[in-house]
Amino acid sequence: MTEQADFASTGVSATAPEGGPSGAPVDVDIAAVLDRAAAGGRITPEEALVLYRDAPLHALGSAADAVRRRRYAGTEHIATYIIERNINYTNVCVTACKFCAFYAAPKDVGKGWTRDLDDILRRCAETVELGGTQIMFQGGHHPDYGVEYYEKHFAAIKKAFPQLVIHSLGASEVEHMARISGVTVEEAVTRIRDAGLDSFAGAGAELLPARPRKAIAPLKESGERWLEIMETAHGLGVESTTTMLMGTGETNAERIEHLRMIRDVQDRTGGFRAFIPYTYQPENNHLKGRTQATILEYLRMIAIARLFLDNVAHIQGSWLTTGKEIGQLSLHYGADDLGSIMLEENVVSSAGARHRSNRMEIIDLIRSAGRVPAQRSTTYEHLVVHDDPANDPVDDRVVSHLSSTAIDGGTAHPELKLVDAR
Ligand code: SF4
């Protein structure tokens, strides 16, 4: 298949009965729009909605793959992964998001916990020992943790492990810590950046449009405010990734509106390195009965993100919430990255994400999907290209959920003397 795919043979056109994101009905020639998008042309939110909903699945994926291959011409045969650890410093949270199975309210005596600095540093040491390059410091909105808490912890981590990239937090945590400390968002970002934060992980985006956001996270800042804080961070030199939580009852139009809001900010800042959609997990939370996103909806989102977010470099497929085979398929629908081997993860695992993997398996998954696997850095440089299976890494300790509490088998590894996180 050539880089510029020809989708005229699909011969499909559609009118959006529910209208575009703006509500106005639109006629869209699907084949023509797919051809334009595959050739690198920008598509409108209205066109994106019709493609997302009505384009033939394989034509949509082919167009997205054409865009990926053009963007990465010369290295288009490669798909990346990273080794990292989520360090969940506390589960105490005042924000009570309805989809969250991880948090404990401050009044829930006996349920809340906080890790001390020694524990956190030990987890960093284990990450380094296993070849991890990044930590995601991720936790609840603790009522006592202001900017000072994060300054202290980031400075200590950087002092002990300067080789670890701190890719952590997001706009919601910044809003919260700034409020606790009585400072501006600009000051909060500047201070935690100077203490050691390298980039924001972009958690908390959930769904940015107002209706679905209020339905699942009524106490969180608005989507506009989330983006405003990210824009401020980008202006202060702190780049980020961005995410989408799919499947809590949002409409297709709201999914596309989420992408539009991101693209508009990215046009101004260029600070979003990657877009990472993932699917809602239904266990142990307050959204029981909600419809989950289907696998096909997920693949269509990967593809439409690659086509619509023409200003975001990386699209990440999630094997953690959708499964390994879907992760592999996502590499043919526009994704260039398969995310991470998470040595520890407790947040989405608490809500039911049961998929586990290890480094050797991720390498094999990427290879059997027809790509050359490469371990990457936080900023997507290729650290190790696994172009010869004879030289594949053999360390079987590099497994996901090594010390997670939220998944069976995610216990401490005896050789590493990992702590019992409970
Ligand atoms: S998603 Fe984050 S902010 Fe929301 S309740 Fe869970 S820990 Fe708190």
Image (cartoon, rainbow, N blue to C red):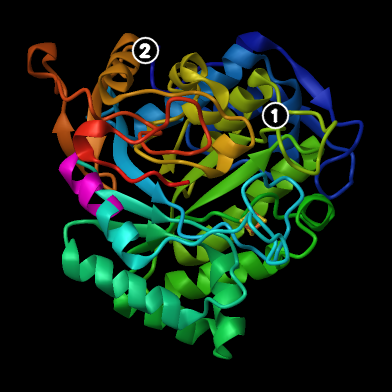
Q: Could you say which is closer to the camera, residue 399 or residue 245?
A: 399
Question: In the picture, which quadrant includes the N terminus?
Answer: top left
Residue on which disc 1 sits:
52
Horizontal arrangement in the rendering, residue 417 relative to residue 186 (left or right): left
Write down the region rendered in magenta: 123-130
- Residue drawn 52% across and 62% down? 170
Whether the residues at callouts 2 and 1 have beta carbons within 8 Å, the answer is: no
Mark 2, secondary structure of its residue: loop
In the image: residue 332, left or right of residue 24:
left
The percent coordinates of residue 157 (x first, y second) are 26, 66
Q: Looking at the image, which residue sits at the far left?
A: 391
**Residue 248 image-quadrant placement:** top right
Q: Secondary structure of the magenta portion, mostly? A: helix
* Image-quarter location of ligand 1: bottom right
Residue, far bottom: 182
Residue 240 visible (yes or no): yes
Can see residue 36? no
Question: How many angstroms separate mark 2 from mark 1 (CA)?
Answer: 24 Å
